[in-house]
Image (cartoon, rainbow, N blue to C red):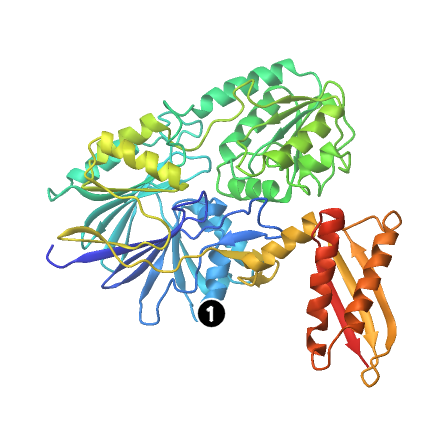
Amino acid sequence: MGNARITITPLGGLGEIGMNCQKWKTDQGVVLIDCGLMFPDDSLWGVDVVIPSLGSVFEDEEDILGIILTHGHEDHIGALPWLLVQYKSLRGLRIFGSPFTLSLVEHKLEEHGLLDRVSLIPVQPYEKAVLGDMTFRFIPVCHSIPQCYALCAETPAGKVIHTGDFKLDPHPLDGASSDPCGDFASFAHEGGGDGVRLLFSDSTNVDCEGHSLPESRVRDDLDAIFAEVRGRIVIALFSSHIGRIRTVLELAGKYGRAVFVSGRSLLTNIEKAAELGLLDPPSNIYSELTGLPDMDPARTVVLATGTQGEALSALARIARGEHRHISLGEGDTVIMSSRVIPGNARALSRVLDQIYRLGASVYRGDRIVHATGHACREELQAVIRAARPEYFIPVHGEYRHLALHARLAGECGAGGVKIIEDGQPVTLDGDGLRLEPPIPAESVMVDGKGVGDVGRVLLKERRILGGEGMVAVILVIAEETGEVLLGPEMISRGFVFEQRYSHILEDSKCLVLDQLENMKPGTEDRLSENIRSVLRRFFRDLLGRDPIVLPIVLRV
């Protein structure tokens, strides 16, 4: 092996759920493993998505060999458009993935006008792709989206396995059976050698004991619910869960129900899956584009987006009574066939409250209507024991997940176990695995068309605006005489109800005039700051509130 080495840098996914992205670098070039985004929590006011820091992904002299995608979830492919925007000189960038994954990538890049910048290369299970001095074998694994892969990589420094997102389900409903433990063990023993040198493994469900439920259990309970319910059925689920969608379509046919699809992402993914033969949509499937024929609601089932309580989602519109085609009432049933992503519980609770007010029933945890797509502790143990790595690094999780997974790996006899976070490169060579100096890996917030311009200071101002409101002070002064030509005018937004607290705003005007009268020569440029300080103090002392005060002083 000599001095052969590979340096792997996590750019996202180690320290948070989502934003998965790794940079693998050898002497012959760079490969990116996944390029995902993360959805913001309640603390990121107005932020649309969060992406890895992409500015330093590729250095000037590096040969970019390609991007490998393990599967098509947004936390693994969602940041690709921003990567291409960041590196405008990239042309013909090779992106490898399963046919379904690449169909989602194609749609995404086409929407952004970036499809002509890449070359999409579909790969089949167990196919190999040679990128420079690295050879990647695509190992089929079961997850909550079709055609997912783990990666068995032959690198200059030895064999490396990346599990991607996975669970062990020997009898999946789509018939695409997989045996990653057997595949990892075979890979370890191929060609003699030193076995697997480094294993990266999904940590998402490391705090869940036992074994994940198979999708067949969900199908059985959904079947029982379909048999019992006499009214309309609304099923909220992730738009990428094609296996679950297939189950619903089959049950709708079994019980003679027409299907209505509400949600653009759901409709797009169903069309993509049908094109690839992953779904066989029935003839009586409708959407918001076609409308729903006049029929008995009890003979319909609705597939809806909105599992996380998103305000503009199909489920939220149905709950508010604002949907053009679907309404809920007594005897109807809503099935929440998904997990709640941390940070979204409050928004979802509001939607569920509205559904209950309409008289509908809701199935969540009282029946098995959802099964995780991530391996639990028993499955994680099985993978570690099958691969028997020399070194182990947990990935895909918050720090507590990584710590628990590292401890589990030690209990399973894994060799050198290391916990690293975003921006901490590791180098694997003939001497072992070592940490390199960390690099900046701050996440980047995207708000509308702005990328990276929203920082902590701006978020703090948004938080204050949302919690305390704003008071604008408008004052026009004659530049030569200092005479007040207009104002001071006080405009309150989100601070106080002006009709009730008009006397407070009138008193604050006097404070503004006091600052103007007491202004010393040569301190005119400090007037705005003085007004801001005295008004903030006044509002805090009188009302216990601290709004943003915006003085607008014009001299004419």
Residue 213 visible to the viewer: yes
Q: Amino acid at mark 1?
A: Lys
Residue 284 visible to the viewer: no
Quadrant of the frame with the C terminus: bottom right
Q: Quadrant of residue 177?
A: top left
Q: Is residue 314 above or below residue 69?
A: above
Assign a secondary structure to mark 1. loop
Q: Is residue 44 above or below residue 354?
A: below
Q: Residue 144 at what x, y percent from top left?
A: 46, 35
Q: Residue 212 at what x, y percent from top left?
A: 40, 25
Q: 385 or 552: nearer the eye? A: 552
Q: Describe residue 73's horizontal placement relative to residue 131 as left or right.
A: right
Q: Describe residue 148's horizontal placement relative to residue 470 as left or right.
A: left
Q: Residue 64 at what x, y percent from top left?
A: 34, 64
Q: Is residue 455 above or below residue 266?
A: below
Tell me the residue at 50%/65% (across/down): 85
Give the class, few, some or many, for how many residues have Cα within 10 Å of label 1's Cα (few <14, many ≥20).
few
Q: On the image, numbered disc 1 is attached to which residue? A: 88
Q: Residue 170 at what x, y percent from top left?
A: 35, 26
Tell me the residue at 75%/75% (across/down): 519
Q: Quadrant of residue 29?
A: bottom left
Tell me the residue at 55%/51% (across/down): 49
